[in-house]
Amino acid sequence: MAWGTFLTYVLVMAGVTYLIRMLPLAAIRGKVRSKFVQAFLYYVPYAVLGAMTIPAVFSSTGSLPGAVAGVVVAVVLGWLNKGLLTVAAAACVAAYVVSMVVH
């Protein structure tokens, strides 16, 4: 790829990223008073994180039983208010052990 083309792509991506982050700040000047909009904006990060994470979890292990075991362990430990490192490590271990046993 030519250097000029690469630089053009980077500048366009930077501009689009900046606009996406700047437009809400410019469009919404005061406090949002609508309860619906407040609730929507509160839950959007969780919905996006779930939509990006869940498909990756089930396709990353190569073993559906291992992925299910990891998710179950993560949900249970998260429900019990364990720390992020504990949940992640236990889910990885569970997925690995079940994948090794099944295959």
Image: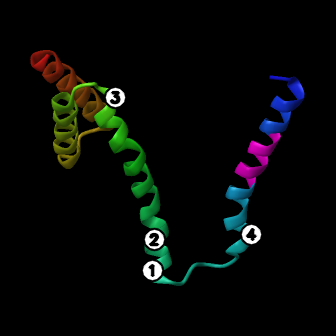
Q: Secondary structure at mark 3?
A: helix
Of marks 1 and 3, the one in the foreground? 3
Residue type marked 1: Phe
Name the residue beneath numbered marker 3: 60
Where residue 63 sits, quadrant-wise, is: top left
Q: Position of residue 44 (x, y in %)?
A: 46, 61
Q: Position of residue 31 (x, y in %)?
A: 60, 78
Which colour assignment does the render follow?
Answer: rainbow
Q: Is the residue 8 above or below the residue 40 in the image?
A: above
Give me the disc on residue 36.
1
Foreground pick, 78 / 73:
73
Residue type marked 3: Ser
**Marks 3/2: CA–CA distance:** 30 Å
**Marks 1/3: CA–CA distance:** 36 Å
Instruction: Using a 10 Å C-alpha cutoff, classify the residue at mark 4 as few (fewer than 14 neighbours), some (14 to 19) or many (20 or more).
Output: few
Q: Is residue 40 magenta?
A: no
Instruction: Using a 10 Å C-alpha cutoff, classify the residue at mark 2 as few (fewer than 14 neighbours), some (14 to 19) or many (20 or more).
Output: few
Q: Is residue 68 left or right of residue 18?
A: left
What residue lies at 85% left-to-right and 23% top-to-bottom?
2
Which numbered disc, 3 or 2, marks the residue that appears first in the sequence? 2
Majority secondary structure of the magenta segment?
helix
Residue numbers of the magenta segment = 11-18
Give me the disc on residue 26.
4
Which numbered disc, 1 or 4, marks the residue that appears first in the sequence? 4
Residue type marked 2: Phe
Q: Do labels 1 and 2 touch, CB within 8 Å? A: yes
Which numbered disc, 4 or 2, marks the residue that appears first in the sequence? 4
Instruction: Using a 10 Å C-alpha cutoff, classify the residue at mark 3 as few (fewer than 14 neighbours), some (14 to 19) or many (20 or more).
Output: few
Instruction: Using a 10 Å C-alpha cutoff, classify the residue at mark 1 as few (fewer than 14 neighbours), some (14 to 19) or many (20 or more).
Output: few
